[in-house]
Amino acid sequence: MELYVVYIVILAIIIKFYNGENYNNKCRTMLKVEELESYITQKMESISGLTDDEKESIDEKYSYNFSSVAKFWLNLPAYDEKIVQYSLSSGTRISYIFKTIRFLKEQGLANIDNDNEIFTTGKMDALIMGYYPENNRKKEILSFLEKI
């Protein structure tokens, strides 16, 4: 389940940084961690609010377990004041975001400043703008998440 959460965080980052029909235009240079957490939570609440039949239909249509991810995400607290370093912790929404950013940073795709501001790299820009227009499956999932 944790891997699916990481995917959702990455997809949300793509949605928030890139726009246009084919996600081929970078629309911002920075994203606050709190804004990303709020955006993902809003999307997961939308999914959670669907009927069981609607959830099952969406999960089948996209071959992705959105309903379980939504339940998992919403059962996590956003923060834990006892945590000193979120990227090395687990059990909160923010810690999953920081773990994902750490992974993206290791891949040369994103950076974080002041433990609060997410930036994409030129490598990420090239990957998204060059790859996503050719991949209908990922475009379909991104469009679904953006619209829900």
Image (cartoon, rainbow, N blue to C red):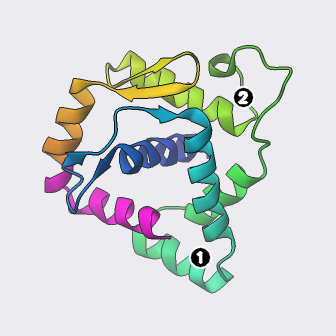
Would you call the spot at circle 1 few (<14 residues within 10 Å), some (14-19), or many (20 or more)? some
Relative image position of residue 89 (x, y in whole percent): 71, 22
Is 114 rendered above or below residue 80? above
Which residue sits at x=63%, y=49%?
Answer: 38
Would you call the spot at circle 2 few (<14 residues within 10 Å), some (14-19), or many (20 or more)? some
Is 84 rendered above or below residue 8? above
Most frequent secondary structure within the magenta stretch: helix
Amino acid type of disc 1?
A: Lys
Amino acid type of disc 2?
A: Ser
Is 46 rendered above or below residue 99? below
Q: Is residue 145 magenta?
A: yes
Q: Which mark is residue 135?
A: none
- Region of the chain picked out in magenta, as a range: 132-148
Q: Which residue is mark 2?
A: 90
In this rendering, does residue 148 appear at all? yes
- Choose top left, top right, bottom left or bottom right for residue 66: bottom right
Which residue sits at x=37%, y=59%?
Answer: 142
Which residue sits at x=30%, y=47%?
Answer: 18
User: Helix or strand or loop: what does disc 2 sit on?
Assistant: loop
**Direction right: furthest residue:** 82
- Left or right: where does residue 123 sit relative to residue 45? left
- Choose top left, top right, bottom left or bottom right for residue 96: top right
In this rendering, does residue 63 appear at all? no
Q: Earlier in the sequence, mark 1 or mark 2?
A: 1
Which residue sits at x=53%, y=47%?
Answer: 4
Q: Is residue 104 magenta?
A: no
Q: Which mark is residue 55?
A: 1
